[in-house]
Amino acid sequence: MSEKVRVRYAPSPTGYLHIGGARSALFNYLYAKKYNGDFVFRIEDTDIERNIPGAEESQLHDLIWLGIIPDESPEKPNPKYAPYRQMAKLDIYKAYAQKLVDMGVAYECYCSEDELAEMKEEQLSNGVKSFKYNRHCLHLSEEEKEKYRKEGRKPTIRLKMSENHEFKFHDLVRGDVSFNSNDIGDFVIMKSNGIPTYNFAVVIDDHLMEITHVLRGEEHLSNTPKQLQIYEYFGWEPPKFGHMTIIVNPNGKKLSKRDHNILQFMSQYKELGYIPEAIFNFLFLLGWTSEDNKEIFTKEEAIEAFDPARLSSSPSMFDNKRLLWTNSYYIKHMNDEDYFSFILPFIKKIDFLKAKTDEELKKIALIFKQEIHTGAEIIDLLNEIVVRKEKLSEEEETVLAKETSPKVIEVFKKKLQNLIEINETSVKALFKETQTETGIKGKDLYMPIRIKLTGEMHGIEMFNIIDILGKEETLSRL
Ligand code: GLU
């Protein structure tokens, strides 16, 4: 490849970083890094009514959190390509739109919203499948335009589509694709308020920023011929396009923002204690398959292994179990120091443990390192222990009602009162002594105490439970 690879992720700041957006960004990033190129982050903010505060920051900073680090962005502009927000470039779009008008391939359109709606309705009632602008304004004379302006109408600018023209391109994901220009109506490139539409601004940006490859969601496939038409009129070489398949839920339905079984936004993952490297790894395998079914990839390994030819051409299934598995893998393999800084903020949310020192909390944290799938899960697991259960099950009541149970509890309690240090050896010794004194062993020995302490019949080891509860609370529960 002779030219430098330049790819981009170009979100609209109409929402926070979403799982689908993160995946698009990731594959562009991998493409750039694989071929020593640049990964550009820019903002498509022309849909001004839908922009929301904080969205740009979330889009950029959540990506950085994931390790998808842009080489250029509004915060790290390269003067050669700046600005990185479309609303700061309105004059540029205006000048290019004027060029197309001067060339006779774009024209002012004075049709009102109502007139367009009427036109559409008429076409649909005549059996036309998809609406095409009827070119009412294509050949307006200066006088006609003047008359419209006097009525207070403000024109949009429409691109004149060429006729009987095939737009062919080789899609990096789907192979050869072609569209016929006759199926596409003349579309608006500049709105009457002087703001460009997506299809126009994106071409100007990709061209001026020297973008070489565009990997984006398949919902943009039908926009590509419109964009190719603009490239053709300007005589610019278009980038190579690749349209990634949709993400579906386990029922095969397109991932929807209303699907509450699947976390949608990166901020939610962050909050619940997902590890960025794990999400990176998971996203990498969401739409890409490794040759040997390898499942764990570091960022460097993903860059090394990435090959755009292996981008999947069928929908990618979002498998929550796989995500949890991946996250737990990364938790298990953290070194203890990293694990502590990751997990302590979660443990500190538990009021019951407020009095414990960091050293004590670290000990508790380690008990769960091999068990948890997310950081927040440790809160649930600890709450199962520290929050007293209101009501026992019938089975648990039966255990406590056994004639041996009160004896076991009483003896164990008495011995615990004199215990100085709680650790694995001392607590095990305590059970042994209780067994010798009462002659009761096995389940009859352990179960009543476990139930008294946690209200559960299963769980982590008894010495850990006692350690977490502390001597005073343990005695009180017994
Ligand atoms: N702003 C567009 C989007 O968020 C970008 C599309 C593109 O990559 O061309 O979908």
Image (tube, rainbow, N blue to C red):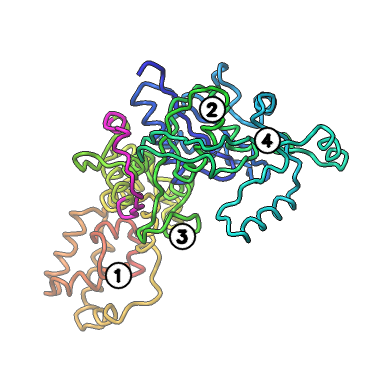
Q: Residues within 10 Å of mark 3 (few under 14, many from 20)?
A: few
Asked whether, in this view, residue 322 is left or right of residue 135, the answer is left
Q: Amino acid at mark 1?
A: Glu
Mark closer to the chain start, 1 or 3: 3
**Residue 231 - label:** 2
Decide whether residue 311 is among the magenta residues: yes
Disc number lying in front (4 or 2): 2
Which residue is the site of mark 4?
A: 190
Say whether disc 3 or disc 2 marks the residue closer to the N-terminus: 2
Q: Position of residue 307 (x, y in %)?
A: 29, 32
Q: Residue at x 36, y 54 (%)?
A: 378
Q: Residues within 10 Å of mark 4 (few under 14, many from 20)?
A: many
Q: At numbered mark 4, what does the secondary structure look like: helix, strand or loop?
A: strand
Q: Quadrant of the C terminus?
A: bottom left
Contact check, label 4 and label 2, Cβ < 8 Å: no
Kindly identify the residue that appears in the image at 44 percent across and 41 percent down. 22
What segment is highlighted magenta in the picture?
301-322
Would you say the residues marked 1 and 2 are in contact, meaning their CB atoms lie under 8 Å apart? no
Looking at the rendered structure, which numbered label has been put on residue 456? 1
Task: Look at the image and tell me in which quarter the N terminus lies.
Answer: top left
Residue 76 seen anywhere in this rendered image of the structure: yes
Left or right relative to 258: residue 431: left
